Amino acid sequence: MEEIVTAEEAARYLKVHPKTLQRWCREGKIPALRLGNRYRLRLSDLRPADASAVDAPVSADRSAPAPAPAGGRRARIIAVANQKGGVGKTTTAQALGAALADRGDRVLLVDLDPQASLTASLGLRPDELEQTIATLIARFLDGDEPMDPAAVIVPLDDRLALVPSNIHLSAAEVTLPNQVRREYVLGEILAPIVDAYDWIFIDCPPSLSLLTINALTCADSCLVPVVPEPLVTVGVGLLFQTVARVRRTRLNPGLSVAGVILTKVDARPTLTRGVIDDLRATLGGRVPILGEVRGSIRVQEASASGIPLTRYRPAADVARAYREIAEALDAACRSG
Ligand SMILES: Nc1ncnc2c1ncn2[C@@H]1O[C@H](COP(=O)(O)OP(=O)(O)O)[C@@H](O)[C@H]1O
Ligand SMILES: [Mg+2]
């Protein structure tokens, strides 16, 4: 006799969030019987290939039963993270995203900071937005039907788009800790759109909170902007410990560190060079330094104008530096 399981049991079996499994059922990605508003599945329909995903609890849809749409290639998801504020995470996410979009890639920027600097730096008024990443998270946690992330995405041009944020995201820091599979929520939300982009950059908040852990859990790699100042190696060490923990606890065993980016580099060489040498020693050749961005007034000017840095003054040194880092990141992702 055929063994029939509930959607919850099937979700546990495939190690995906129950809502992801419900979505697969709804979208016909997996055969299911509908009983009222509940689904039942045949155990034999959870193919052995899917069961192999049991040991690979990365992002849910990477283990989805349905293949990616024809011609679709999953986005490389990059978490731009450092628990220290003011080190250039937002600037880096925005500048690299625009640089890669200008090369012809499809790029989604995700503002995961309640302070919404990325949203504001792209000319939007965070406090006036009704639909943001906070809405997606709240609807994922509360609603029966997860919301289509496309409804929240703000297209900036035909290659570059933004999932904006605002202060309501701070509520997620309170509600998330009580949820099932709380570290996987962002990955589950982004899963339906990962085939629509070549890159997704997640601009993390300045903390190692559950929001940052969510970004690290769904990312392929993280990118770490660092201002070369005395004691910087301590903070970077803490972040790398977090990355190691995310791998070790199997939240995301495949997470890599794509590299460090030196930002706001001071033109006065002696002190800075000493710090950079210390940092290189700490990284020990395992993590590359992808590039250096000098301190420049152009960064704040671009941010105030609402135009991405690499487009504001394309010939400026900082814009060139970010374009080179975009190439280095692309090369690192291709080889790794
Ligand atoms: N290379 C740079 N030169 C000068 N100012 C910079 C540079 N990078 C970032 N900034 C400025 O530093 C501040 C913090 O940068 P931001 O990217 O918001 O950092 P984070 O997201 O890590 O908090 C912003 O005012 C930004 O304009
Ligand atoms: Mg920021």
Image (spheres, rainbow, N blue to C red):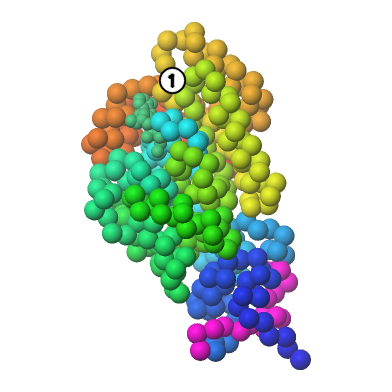
For disc 1, the neighbor class at 10 Å (few under 14, some 14 to 19, many from 20) is some
Residue plotted at (54% across, 69% down): 20
Instruction: Where is residue 203? Give x, y as percent.
Output: 43, 43
Element carrying mark 1: strand
Name the residue located 39 percent from the left edge and 56 percent from the top edge: 134
Q: Is mark 1 within 8 Å of ligand 1?
A: yes
Residue 111 position within the rendered picture, expressed as x and y whole percent measured from the top left: 39, 48
Query: Residue 170: where, in percent of width, then height?
Result: 40, 50
Query: Residue 43: within the magenta?
Result: yes
From this view, report whether residue 114 is shown above or below residue 179: above
Q: Residue at x 50, y 57 (%)?
A: 176
**In this view, 257 is above or below 160:** above
Q: Which residue is mark 1?
A: 265
> Can residue 303 be seen from the camera position used here?
yes
| Place of residue 6 in the rendered image (x, y in percent of width and height, measured from the top left) | 63, 81
Residue most extreme to the right: 1
Residue 162 visible in image: no
Answer with the quarter of the image where residue 30 lies.
Answer: bottom right
Position of the N terminus by quadrant: bottom right
Q: Nearer the viewer, residue 219 or 73?
A: 219
**Quarter of image, res 317:** top left
Which stretch did the figure color magenta?
A: 36-51
Residue 162 belongs to the span the image colors magenta: no
Task: Give the amino acid type for the residue marked by disc 1 in the picture.
Answer: Val
Which quadrant does ligand 1 occupy?
top left
**In the picture, which quadrant includes the C terminus?**
top right
